[in-house]
Image: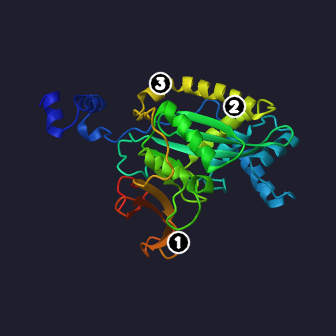
Amino acid sequence: MSIRQAALHFGVAVSTVLFWVKRAGQQRLDRVRWSDHSVHHTAVNRVTKSVEQCVLDLRKELKEQSDLGEFGADAIRHEMDTRGCKVLLSRATINRVLQRNGMLDGKHRKRITPPPKGWYLPNNEEQTAELDQFDYIKECYLKGGQVVHILNGISLYSGLVYSKPVLRMTAENTVQGMMEHWREVGVPEYVQFDKGTVFHGLNHPDSIGSVSKLCLSLGVIPIFVPPREFGFQAAVESYNGRWERAVWNRFTFKNIKEIQTQSDLYVHAVKEKIETKTRLAAERKMINKNWKFNNKTEKNGTIIFLRRTDDNGCAKVMGHLWELDKNWTHRLIRATVDLKNNIILFHKLRRKDPHHHT
């Protein structure tokens, strides 16, 4: 049959048939090597067998006889230098020699592919729902001993940043800072905080703090991450570090006004850098110019709590302990509090399968 007919018959590409026909050439079919050829390349600068054996012998000698008891790459290199070896290998090369010969005692950490951004959010398979994260850099001391705190915010997808130094870390200052930022760039669909009292409010049963009330009045869903849990606030924690390196550690400030001036320059530079990324992100809803925040309005909307269950499969939400699943211990759950209908929906969160939260 023809080349094309053979390709159709076996369900492969024409190039595949041509490859194997070329491999067979003029040989008898029973003499053709049909298995894939393994290609071994030897590096031109690979260490000689004698030097490699020297490294292995030194490791064995140091392990058995060294007073210090060290026989790693650094110890082997130091011993080669002491003995005046003509070929002095680098630390990385010695490690490669040891690894090639199965002489490394340490185990490599298995790296697990992280879940997508916002994997714990409801109905976010397309990753289109914008999420802002807020956090404080606490206790920055000015010359003379005055304490300043920095309210920082960053958007998970668009990268929009916000920084505001304040003298007191209060819920009122937090609300003012968030309103200032959102009036300029618009509100996201979600906003995320840690368990700090300044964000969460007092730990009384069924109580809702001022920050949550602001979010609810603007139609933004507040999310509170588990206490002492790493990763959920990684974006804003990373921005905290960048802000400190670029602003706080580079200059000496006399007062809070100087901090605000330099911080504004940095925030403006960041926004210019991420302009393309911001333009491609989801559109944010702008706040009406006549809108004013009323702390006493009726609480309506949704609040999300991310929690980890205890030994008995229970989780504490809104000041109450809820019995969930005895087989789901020390695992993450998402509690969606529907204030309008007085309902809490609990979902089991799965990092490895982020689109199926039961």
Please state the horizontal and vertical placement of residue 295, each as a whole percent of the image. 51, 50
Give the amino acid at mark 3: Thr
Query: In the image, residue 82 lies at what x, y percent?
Result: 88, 42
Residue designated by label 1: 310
**Residue corresponding to mark 3:** 276
Q: Secondary structure at mark 3?
A: helix
- The mark tally for this picture is 3
Q: Which class describes the residues within 10 Å of circle 2: few (<14), some (14-19), or many (20+)?
A: some
Gap between marks 3 and 1, in whole Å?
44 Å
Residue 38 is marked as none
Res 26 → quadrant? top left
Q: Around disc 3, counting alpha carbons within 10 Å, would you say few (fewer than 14), some (14 to 19), or many (20 or more)?
A: few
Q: Which marked residue is nearer to the observer: mark 1 or mark 2?
A: 2
- Which of the two discs, 2 and 3, sits closer to the camera? 2
In this view of the protein, which residue sits in the foreground, 175 or 311? Answer: 175
Q: Is residue 85 above or below residue 67?
A: above
The amino acid sitting under disc 2 is Gln
User: Which residue matches tag 2?
Assistant: 260
First in residue order: circle 1 vs circle 2: 2
What residue sits 74% from the left and 37% below the top?
90
Q: CA distance from mark 1 to mark 2?
A: 43 Å
Q: Amino acid at mark 1?
A: Asp
Q: Quadrant of residue 299?
A: bottom left
Pointers 2 and 3 in contact (C-beta within 8 Å)? no
